[in-house]
Image (cartoon, grey):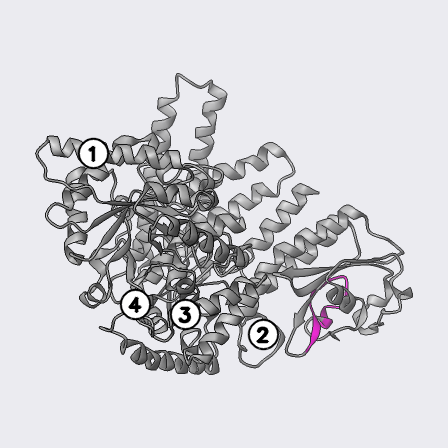
Amino acid sequence: MLDTLHRIVHAVNKAPNLQEALGTLVSAVREAIDCDVCSIYLVDDDTRSNVLMATVGLEDSAVGKVRLPFGRGLVGLVAERAEPVNLADAPAHPRYVRMAHTGETRYRGFLGVPIIQNRRVLGVLVVRQREEREFQDEEVTFLFTLAAQLAGAITYARASGELDALTREHQPLHRFLVGQPGHAGVAIGTAVVSFQLSDLEAVPDRPVDDPEAECARFERALAQVEADLRHLQERMADQLPEEDRALFDALLLMLRSETLVSQTEEAIHRGLWAPAALRDTISAHAQIFDEMDDPYLRERASDVRDLGRRILMHLQDDDPGLVEYPPDTILVGEEISAMQLAEVPPGRLAGVVSASGSGSSHAAILARAMGIPAVMGVSEMPVSRMQGRELIVDGYRGRVYIEPAPSVRIEYERLIAEEEALGAEVEAMRGLRSETTDGHIVPLHLNTGLINQMNGEEQAEADGVGLYRTEFPFMVRDRFPGEGEQLRNYRRVLEAFAPRPVVLRTLDIGGDKALPYFPVVEQNPFLGWRGVRISLQHPEIFLTQIRAMLRADIGLGNLQIMLPMISGVSEVDELQQLIQRAHDELLEEGHVVAMPRIGVMIEVPSAVYQAGEIARRVDFLSVGTNDLTQYLLAVDRNNPRVADLYDELHPAVLRALRDITAAAGEFGRPVSVCGELAGNPLATILLIGLGVNSLSMSAGSLLRVKWVVRSISRTRARQITQVALRMEDVGQVRRFMEGTLEEMGLGGLIRPGK
């Protein structure tokens, strides 16, 4: 049944809308398990009923009209229990309800499985048999798997209003897709889909004004692929037997097949641009092979898709126009990168929505640095169908509204107005010292890697830079930057903030930060080759960077160096030896360099337990709560399936911070927090109470955090923190801190308008 399952799932995923997806599914399921009836009921929360939405075997006239109130009938029983119900003789069950007008009274065997997404029942998939029949275990799991595949399509249809259109006449209600809050704020704008090159599945729909010109572009791409294939065929002539070389002939025939060319051109003339027309044609051709019974022929589907990627690559090389970014651009993608964010012209980016990642992923961090509302991990979002659609991005609750109803739009416009009013109160903090009511100074530093995009006000407001991510200049080049290039970049940062301290973190690549010219491909990159692990194995990269940092600091004296991803004291010792070596070499060369303060990022659990030994060796500690939380809770922060388990206010994280500050205090070493927790007003009181000496955050969070600092005494912060440390559940901690800010009159910092 596995091959059958794959073919059905593929066909359902390719359906252009929910109605066709449901129709495809019920027909395929009835044939696959040889039953008499297959039906799908979907949950309608507004009428509190399960609605018959598709069927094969019951009366067609019942579709959309039959509604079973919640809790009624066997369908209601499946939805209520959220587990399968398998009955050989359904009419004998006490919950059975007779519905003569559907024709189902002729059937006895019954199997119903729930359609579930994120622990919520969305509907019920039902199969029936005329005679008594208890369905087998493999048939139950088969339906369960199909139901899970269907859940994403139903969630999107509910959010976009498509489901309402199928069941009722009135306007779409307050529907939305759910993800993880990436950066607080609200944005209303137009979706622009950003996609990876040569990824057919990611190509979005876009209209075309000149079909003839687009067809000519498609023809040029075909000619270029044909030339590539003939060149490969000639090059492999002496290396492959004749029967294997015949594959190239087959690909050439496929490339110029009438159906591939004509179907693509027909789609272009219907108004699609060439990449989307090609996407649909290749998908249709590959599906034909996917559905074949012969395993050899089925494998040819991969050849078709590879051919499509080659054509797409040449189409992209021949693209005559740039992407248009409206003034209110909402950037949408399967996975948003730093480069994609940078491509949007200044002042036009209103919001970010990513199908992958979480509130602590790299893209979310960048969005916060730019002050852009963001929602991450919207896994049910059909990215390719989002181009040009109006969206509301709710970065507070992690919601995305697609073409919202007028009432929803009005409500969010009101919230935006309240945000602007709150902003005026926050602005009143500008220029004031960051000190508690009892006179304790809490320096507030900036996290940045985009110094050129910072304005003068942001630079003036900060007490320095607590984390400069040096990998950004590495990521925007096609090779490693040399010592001179790095020197000039670091000098600009140091000069901009002198005499205030600037902490330059050494190169921290790996995990979710890859260099195009230095790929690190691993099964589990967050536990793999990253941070100082790469620096130690490539000391030439590390030494070049340290030399550039030391030279950039000449005459300024505000440089501090921080080492990331430290897991043990031996790494600290070895890296300090390399720093000393670079320092001594520069002195020998005649450069008047000074040895800066050296610090370590505590972001690995082993470093928490060795915080004292590490503190004895360095000048300061800085806690990277993003990775520390990820490793303490064993939660991949980029995985939307488990992202709701990731919470930096977890008691384990707070207790780890307590232990770090206590260990550092024994050696008189200051501790800063440079993770996203530092910029969260809910955590400010706790961090002061834990004894953290300074906080480093994105520019957009600085004034809000200062407002909290100036509203409480350190003594009171310690008392509140002691209460929070005794709590056992993250929900308790979060509610307690929300209540605390409300009592202080700072509730607007949690969620404006709530």
Q: Residue at x 16, y 43 (%)?
A: 487
Residue 308 is at least partly visible in this image: yes
CA–CA distance in space, label 1 to label 2: 66 Å
The quarter of the rendered structure image containing the N terminus is: top right
Foreground tag (1 vs 3): 3
Residue 712 % position (x, y): 38, 74
- Give amino acid for label 2: Asp
- Give amino acid for label 1: Ala
Foreground tag (4 vs 3): 3
Residue contact at pointers 1 and 3, CB within 8 angstroms: no
Q: Residue at x 61, y 50 (%)?
A: 9
Q: Nearer the viewer, residue 379 or 710?
A: 710
Which residue in the structure is indicated by mark 1?
A: 582
Which residue in the structure is indicated by mark 3?
A: 715
- Indicate whether residue 676 is drawn in magenta: no
Residue 347 % position (x, y): 25, 67
Residue contact at pointers 1 and 4, CB within 8 angstroms: no
Which residue in the structure is indicated by mark 4?
A: 326
Which residue in the structure is indicated by mark 2?
A: 164
Q: Residue at x 48, y 79 (%)?
A: 405
Q: Residues within 10 Å of mark 1 (few under 14, many from 20)?
A: many
SS for tag 1? helix
CA–CA distance in space, label 1 to label 4: 48 Å
CA–CA distance in space, label 4 to label 2: 29 Å
Q: Which residues are magenta?
A: 48-62
- Give amino acid for label 3: Thr
CA–CA distance in space, label 2 to label 3: 55 Å
